[in-house]
Each structure stands twice: as C-alpha cells, then as structure tokens.
Amino acid sequence: MVFYFTGTGNSRFIAERVAEILGEKAIDISTYIKENKYGDFKEEGAYVFVAPCYVSAPARAMMDFIKNSSFPRGIKAYFLITAAVYMGSSPAYCKKMAKKKGFQYMGTENIVMPQNYLTYFKTKEIEENIGIVKSAIPEIDKFGNKINEGQMLTDKKIKFLEVPFTELVCIIYYNLFMKTKQFCVSGDCISCGKCVRECPYGNISLKDGKPVWGKKCTHCMACINRCPKTAIEYGKMSIGKPRYPGPNEVLKMDK
Ligand SMILES: Cc1cc2nc3c(=O)[nH]c(=O)nc-3n(C[C@H](O)[C@H](O)[C@H](O)COP(=O)(O)O)c2cc1C
Ligand code: SF4
Ligand code: SF4
C-alpha cells in the first residue's frame, strides 16, 4: 500500500508513480485527517509512506497517522521523503517509528522537488521548477523499482546531535511558526473555493465568498501556492514571490 501526505502535490506525484510501478493506487491520508480518523489496515506486504520534509523531519501529519493507525505486525515499511534541499534527520524519525510499530524497516530516501515554503524561503520560477521535477522522475522510478523488487533503500547517516537539535527546532517551529493569523486574501479572489478543497486539514471555509482560516494548520502551503488568482498572501513575507502550483501543473507549462 502507498500512502501520502501532501501540500502542493510533490508527495502525491511521487506516491502515484511508485504506486503505478507496484500496480496499486496511492492513498491520500488527508481523507483520514479531515474526518479525524486513523486507519485499521489488514493487508500484508510492503507499505510505502511518502511525505514532505518539514523542518528536517518527516511532516508530522504522516508520523501521527502512522503512530495512530494499526497495521499488521512485521510489514515491510519504506519511506520516501521529498524536500526542497535535504531531508535532514528524517531517516532517524522513520526508523524509530518503524521500530515502535513493529515494522520491518526498509529505509528512507530523499527526493528533491520544488520548494513550496514561500513564506520563509525563496521559491523558484516555473522554468527552474520544471527542471527540478524532470530530474526527480528517474530517481522516483529507481526507488519504485527497488521497492517492487523487495530491495532495501539505502539509509543515510545522521550526524552526531542532529536528531536532538531537529527535535528542539521542530517543537519551537510547530508551536510558534505554523500559524494562520498572517494569511489574508486580496480583492482578486474569485470565490472559487479551491483553497478550501486543497487544504488537507479542512482548515479553510468560505465566508461571504472569501476564505477564512481556522487554527488547525500545518503550514503545508497548498492554499497560498495553488490559488489560481494569487489572491492569498502571508503578511508581507509572500509578496512578489513565485507560487508553486504543483508538479503536474508545472510540467503542463513545459514548452
Ligand atoms: C513547513 C515546511 C517546512 C519545510 N522544511 C524543509 C526542510 O527542512 N528542508 C527542505 O529541504 N525542504 C523543506 N520544505 C520544502 C518541502 O519539503 C518541499 O517543497 C516538498 O517537496 C513539498 O512537498 P509537498 O508538495 O508534497 O507538500 C519545507 C516546506 C514546508 C511547507
Ligand atoms: S483559491 Fe483563491 S480565488 Fe479561489 S476562493 Fe481561495 S483565495 Fe479565492
Ligand atoms: S490552511 Fe493553508 S497552509 Fe494551513 S494546512 Fe490548510 S492549506 Fe495548508
């Protein structure tokens, strides 16, 4: 089974390619998150978990889903982490989770995909993102084939004290920085509701045709990046920065 969590579609893109190689369908865990539910999975065999890297660790949404769902003991667990630069301490988190759940840990790989964190980082123009997505495709297929053949993925070495440092930064970050107060909408909004549909946490609703943000947000950046009218800003931090609409969307713009 292939599960993914995504903000801007990079993890979905990876999960769907890998699922196709495995002859399966990729499952979006946001359907569980939105209903406040966890899974009870009975299928034996290999499980693949695909998620973005947030603050040098796998997105908490995926880790919480694995922690609280039930799986058959001893399943093979593969982790694919997509990052704009590097997945940091993610392999240590995945390995620890696999141990906790009684999985057979099969490794964690990093796949570089376009940066989506436009509030705090510099996002790239479409042309450059097309190149990044194209370069990721052979990597994704290589890992998909390895998984299909039941091979281990290579596990990266983590530096001394990297994990406790990441843990500390994550606590600060998730508690202090992942806020919605600064999201705002301009007059360009056409009330299409895409931001509502894209939010994996079901955290946005339309009031008088305009989005209103609740407090349950993991800063996945789907709403701000995928608005068709670039009508969403995050205070002053996002002004003038290119939006990243997702891998399939940028590939469609390839001339
Ligand atoms: C909250 C947040 C934190 C991030 N932290 C990192 C990071 O520590 N290292 C990194 O290389 N990329 C980081 N990124 C970039 C994403 O991991 C990257 O763009 C990923 O491919 C997005 O996947 P998605 O489209 O499936 O959401 C971060 C993005 C967000 C939104
Ligand atoms: S996606 Fe953009 S245009 Fe559509 S409702 Fe949301 S803010 Fe408005
Ligand atoms: S409100 Fe926006 S940034 Fe927060 S979880 Fe929803 S889509 Fe992601």
Image (cartoon, rainbow, N blue to C red):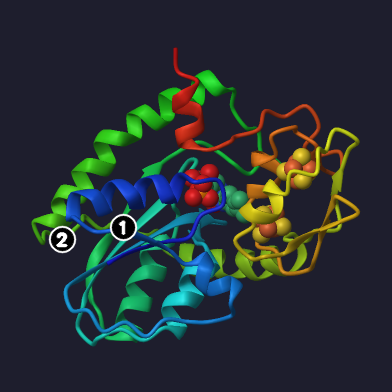
Q: 138 or 174: which is nearer to us? A: 138
Extreme-top residue of the structure: 255
Q: 101 or 42: which is nearer to us? A: 42
Neighbor class of circle 1 (other Cα within 10 Å; few <14, some 14-19, many 20+) is: few
Residue 119 drawn at (x, y percent): 73, 43
Neighbor class of circle 2 (other Cα within 10 Å; few <14, some 14-19, many 20+) is: some
Q: Are marks 1 and 2 in contact (CB under 8 Å)?
A: no
Ligand 2 falls in quadrant: top right
Q: Earlier in the sequence, mark 1 or mark 2?
A: 2
For residue 209, the mark is: none
Is 163 above or below relative to 112? Answer: below
Q: Label 2 amino acid?
A: Met
Horizontally, is 143 left or right of 226 in the view? left
Viewer-side label of 1, 2: 2
* CA separation in Å, label 1 and label 2: 15 Å
Residue occupying the point 55% across, 65% down: 165
Residue identifier under label 1 = 157
Horizontally, is 75 left or right of 134 in the view? left
Residue identifier under label 2 = 152
CB of mark 1 near ligand 1 (< 8 Å): no
Residue 64 drawn at (x, y percent): 50, 76
Q: Label 1 amino acid?
A: Lys
Residue occupying the point 68% across, 47% down: 194
Residue occupying the point 47% across, 67% down: 29
Residue 27 drawn at (x, y percent): 38, 63
